[in-house]
Image (tube, rainbow, N blue to C red):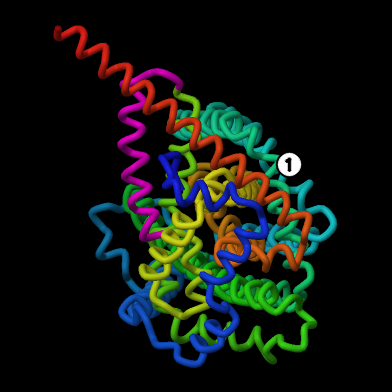
Amino acid sequence: MMDSPVSSASFNSACVNTSDQNAGRSRRSGGVSEVVIVQQQTRRWHDVFWSGIFLIHLIGMGFLLGLLGFNRFEKQNRLNIDRYTAPFSENKNGLTEELWPLYAVAGGVGSVLGWSWLLLLGSRGSQMMKVSVHILTTYLAVISVLCFWAEQFFWGVFFAIGAALQFLYVISVIDRLPFTMLVLQKAVKMVCSLPEVMRLAYAFMLVLLLWMALWSFGAAGVVASSMGDGGRWWLLVVFSVSLFWTGAVLCNTVHVIVSGMVFLVLIHGGREAASMPANSLLKSLKYALTTSFGSICYGSLFTAAIRTLRWKIRGFRSKIGKNECLLCCVDFLFHLVETLVRFFNKYSYVLIAVNGKNFNHSARDAWELFQSTGVEALVAYDCSGAVLLMGIIFSGLITGTCSGVWAWYKWSNRVLMIGSTSMLMGMVLVGVAMVVVESAVTSFYICYAEDPLLIRRWDTEFFNQMSEMLHERLQHRSSRTSEVRMLNRIDGLVQENASI
């Protein structure tokens, strides 16, 4: 998944004619459908420790949220908690019910945006994704101006830097967007053919919304408390990390379920195939919530942050040019992140759904599968995950803006607290809707690496486009490798002549 030399075997496997390539991979996969059936019958529990940690965290955080929210509900300091925060008190007391409606707006707007994404996936999905790519930079810049106008210099600079980074990233990957949009369109086509998957996403959004009702109750109690800004911010950061992890676990649970469904559809040649297992969605749901749940909790802690960092570094790396000092520093960070990607990547969730292994084992298997087949070059070129993330961030910004504008008129000194936490709520809610598309994308690449015939049987034109792009990317890497070797050889000769 990085722009590094690929083995001659990987390059040759992509340069041979399509029929030989397909036959070779089909033999290597060894009958994927039979393996899936056997693995589903012999699944074991994995990463149980992390599922326990997550559940303990959920219970403890729920108790703390309820406690802090109830302390300010209808009466100030109902539970006499302020005695512990007296040294940090600023005597700016409020009530939970005065701030809770602002978070209700965030939950409502985030839910509407998430449901809208799901409803419009079939008819306007690609247009919405294109809009999210191009409008995010503008929206970040507008928020930056508003922050400066409100004399919030730090946040103004923060959003201005975010707008600049987003603009540079889009410019760096502009040539990849046509192929990315093609993959996303095919993913939308797949998920729209599985209405039960869409209903599942709605159900998980409802579950998340119920948790957010409690979360926002506690967050409103914190914002309304008598603590100083420092104490409130620290508590909100802790609550935000908790919400992020909880949202990531729910998103990745949907990811595993949808990946399993898409994999089965591709293996059996269609949803209506006679060989398609009965109650396949319920079985996928059962595995995701039992034997594989610990792996989902474990991977959800790290995967999203590492992926985001990787996208940004790769985008900058491709546009640095010949600045050797900067290139050396970025290369160091790039290879460090790539090492982490070996153990934390989103493709592991597909293999968790298919074979029920633990997270790290599945992540390494996915990495080795892509490396051995050369499909890693295609995965590295695709920016579908980044495009979906842009849509999530844009939706979160809209949610935060709606709550922030209301807070400006009611609690002008706490706009940033309410706006930033509301933004996180919106991002998490919309993320559950977006993950169904990302699950289809990741399943495409795993299936293509395992056996390209699965993709060709489902959509011949899409298979041809993927194969053509893979051939092109491997040729590009081969030419770059040859160029680097030639430059190194010339540098060696120059140094040798200089020493003489």
Q: Kindly identify the residue that appears in the image at 44 percent across and 74 percent down.
A: 66
Nearer to me, 464 or 306: 464
Query: Callout 1: helix, strand or loop?
Result: helix
Q: Is residue 128 above or below residue 103?
A: above
Bounds of the magenta span?
321-344
Pick out the residue farthest to the left. 500
Residue 342 lies in the magenta stretch = yes
x, y percent for residue 74: 51, 70
Q: Is residue 432 among the parts visible in the rendering? A: no
Say which quarter of the image contains residue 488. top left
Which residue does the image show at 45% across and 57% down from the upper left?
A: 372
Which residue is at the front of the view, 244 or 447?
Answer: 447
The quarter of the picture where the C terminus appears is top left
493 shown above or below 29: above
Between 451 and 444, the one lying in front of the other is 451
Q: In the image, is 340 to the left or to the right of 445?
A: left
In the picture provided, is 191 more to the left or to the right than 435? Answer: right
Q: Is residue 225 left or right of residue 145?
A: left
Instruction: Please give the residue where the numbered disc 1 appears in the rendered image.
Output: 131
Q: Residues within 10 Å of mark 1 (few under 14, many from 20)?
A: few
Q: Nearer the viewer, residue 418 or 54?
A: 54
